[in-house]
Amino acid sequence: MKLRVDEISAEAREIAFFEQEDEINRVLGAGPIRDYTVQGPISVTVSHYRAGTEVFLEGDLSARTAAVCARCAEEFVASSTRSFRYVLAPKVLDDSTGGDQRDEDVEYSHYGGDEIDLSPSIREQLLLALPTIPLCAEDCRGLCPRCGANLNLGACGCVIVQPNLGLAVLHSLKIRRA
Ligand SMILES: [Zn+2]
Ligand SMILES: [Zn+2]
């Protein structure tokens, strides 16, 4: 999605659109960044306005993502959402975005020419929305280390004795017998 700079006014305007997922899936598939696949277009809402030469963007995105759970190895689909804010200054006025007044929640960037391409920012924000370790559920029980059964489906019946605990029990038995 591209915005024409001369069509951005001082009054905030909101646009909603879908960003195609092909490019982000290419990035996700190429690098070691995250083991996710985006399913279907990314839904984006962006409100934008201009103050002088700076352009302010405030938006939300959501996408359906598929990943393999790091604990139980099952594929799961989740929805990823993220809010973002950008302040863009034209490239020629590079120094103007420096200084100490930076807001932690705002990304600072630049635009060149008379168009602002939102696509790279949307891809960046969606990557940030993805947890580093994909989990199908916060409390996923994972796989049994002995038989490999998915413990989310029920107990497998394996008795797993912690080696140190076992020794401690033996030790205490010996003391009791003596
Ligand atoms: Zn899981
Ligand atoms: Zn087991």
Image (cartoon, grey):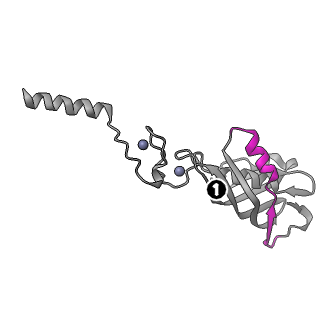
Describe residue 61's horizontal placement relative to residue 115 as left or right: left
Q: Quadrant of ligand 2?
A: top left
Viewer-proximal residue among 84 and 178: 178
Residue 150 on the magenta segment = no
**Residue 101 at least partly seen:** no
In the orientation shown, which residue stands out farthest toward the left? 178
Name the foreground residue: 16 vs 28: 28
Residue at point 58%, 50% (across, down): 74
The N terminus - image quarter:
bottom right
Question: Measuring 82% from the left and 70% from the top, which residue is drawn there?
Answer: 10
Q: Residue at x 45, y 50 (%)?
A: 151
Is ligand 1 within 8 Å of the beta carbon of the residue shown at mark 1?
Answer: no
| Magenta residues, start to end | 10-32
Image position of 22 with respect to 159: above or below: below
Name the spot of residue 16 as percent of width and height, x first: 79, 69
**Among the 4 quarters of the image, the one containing residue 54:** bottom right
Q: Amino acid at mark 1?
A: Asp
Quick check: can you spot residue 109?
Answer: yes
Which of 74/24 is in front? 74
Across and down, in percent, residue 73 comes to: 57, 46
Q: Name the residue beneath numbered marker 1.
A: 105
170 or 121, which is in the foreground?
A: 170
Query: Would you identify the image quadrant in which residue 51 lies?
Result: bottom right
Residue at image position (18%, 28%) is 171
Q: Would residue 165 appear left or right of 125 to someone viewing this image?
A: left
Residue 16 among magenta residues? yes
Q: Secondary structure at mark 1?
A: loop
